[in-house]
Image (spheres, rainbow, N blue to C red):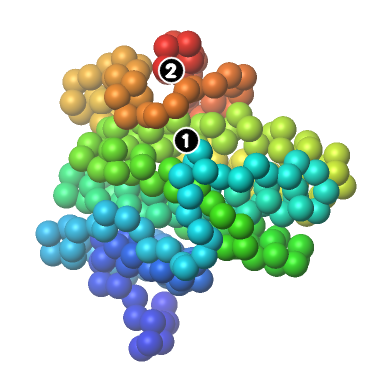
């Protein structure tokens, strides 16, 4: 691959992950995600390690806007018309930007743990797809005369990374198997609503995100089971323990049982938790 001297490829996958999470400009996060993923799949990058390439930051780089608020301080979002459409897409773009950082942090923070190359292949693919999702939503905002940063956004998503930064199994439990799995529940109704409002372009973007999210949850289920097997733990009870300890909130039905099961997240993982987490 060819990169300019102004934008050299990071030397290792870990260095690339660190650079992505630290980048403050969203355009740079996306550019680096594409470049690092291409370099990894073309085998231009070694894995690297946090010891040699630097530890991951405590918080990701962010642009000056949007203003980040505590979830309880977020203003009520308009539910209809152009303003409601823009507000929804803006909130989804913020979620996907956090997903970029969460995925690349997963890659870089735990690189000292010996895992198969296919583990990194899977999560680099996820990191690339999250960057693609953010770009698609950012483009959709532009076509509606808006941009990412125009509205305040909540600052709660990164808390999951901070709470699970010490434990790969906990991170796998919370990010793909709770947060991304929630996307499988709520995205189909959003697609239907977009179509009902005559917004086919947004519906098509959400269909791409939904399709990719199934794979992301599947990767989470696969590697969570792998890690539990390696530690001699039973996956479902272990998942229950991690969620009760590290997830702040409720697992709320209705669940998209079919999509979750297709991704390897069977009801025994999540249904026992729904009435127990308060």
CB atoms of marks 1 and 2 within 8 Å: no
Can you name the residue that lies furthest to the left here? 51
Q: Position of residue 218 (x, y in %)?
A: 46, 34
Residue drawn 70% across and 60% down? 140
157 vs 255: above or below? below
Q: Position of residue 106 (x, y in %)?
A: 32, 48
Q: Nearer the viewer, residue 220 or 273?
A: 273
The residue tagged with tag 2: helix, strand or loop?
loop
Q: Which mark is residue 179?
A: 1
Which mark is drawn over residue 278?
A: 2
Q: How many marks?
A: 2
Question: In the figure, 106 relative to 170: above or below?
Answer: below
Asked if residue 39 shows in the view, the reply is yes
Is 196 in front, or is 159? 159
Within 10 Å of disc 2 (Cα), the crowding (few <14, some 14-19, many 20+) is few
Can residue 118 be seen here? Answer: no
Figure quadrant of residue 41: bottom left
Residue 31 position (above or below residue 148): below
Please give the name of the residue rendered at 36% of the width and 54% of the height, measured from the top-left corner: 104
Of the numbered discs 1 and 2, the one sitting upstream in the chain is: 1
Within 10 angstroms of label 1, few (less than 14), some, or many (20 or more) residues?
A: some
Quadrant occupied by the N terminus: bottom left
Residue 13 percent coordinates (x, y): 29, 62
């Amino acid at each position: 691959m060819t990169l300019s001297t102004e934008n050299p490829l990071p030397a290792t996958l870990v260095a690339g992950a660190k650079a992505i999470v630290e980048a403050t400009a969203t355009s740079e996060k996306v550019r680096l995600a594409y470049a690092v993923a291409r370099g990894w799949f073309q085998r231009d990058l070694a894995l690297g390690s946090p010891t040699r390439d630097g530890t991951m930051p405590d918080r990701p780089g962010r642009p000056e806007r949007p203003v980040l608020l505590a979830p309880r301080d977020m203003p009520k979002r308009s539910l209809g018309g152009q303003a409601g459409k823009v507000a929804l897409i803006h909130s989804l773009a913020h979620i996907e930007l956090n997903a970029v950082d969460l995925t690349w942090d997963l890659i870089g923070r735990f690189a000292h743990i010996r895992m198969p190359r296919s583990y990194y292949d899977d999560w680099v693919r996820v990191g690339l797809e999250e960057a693609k999702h953010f770009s698609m939503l950012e483009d959709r905002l532009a076509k509606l005369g808006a941009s990412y940063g125009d509205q305040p956004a909540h600052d709660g998503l990164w808390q999951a990374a901070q709470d699970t930064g010490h434990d790969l199994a906990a991170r796998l439990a919370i990010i793909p198997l709770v947060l991304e799995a929630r996307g499988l529940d709520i995205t189909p109704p959003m697609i239907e609503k977009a179509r009902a409002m005559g917004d086919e372009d947004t519906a098509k973007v959400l269909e791409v995100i939904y399709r990719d999210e199934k794979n992301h949850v599947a990767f989470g289920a696969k590697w969570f089971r792998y890690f539990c097997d390696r530690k001699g733990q039973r996956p479902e009870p272990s998942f229950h323990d991690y969620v009760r300890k590290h997830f702040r909130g409720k697992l709320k039905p209705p669940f998209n049982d079919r999509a979750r099961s297709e991704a390897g997240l069977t009801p025994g993982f999540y249904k026992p938790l729904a009435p127990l987490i308060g």
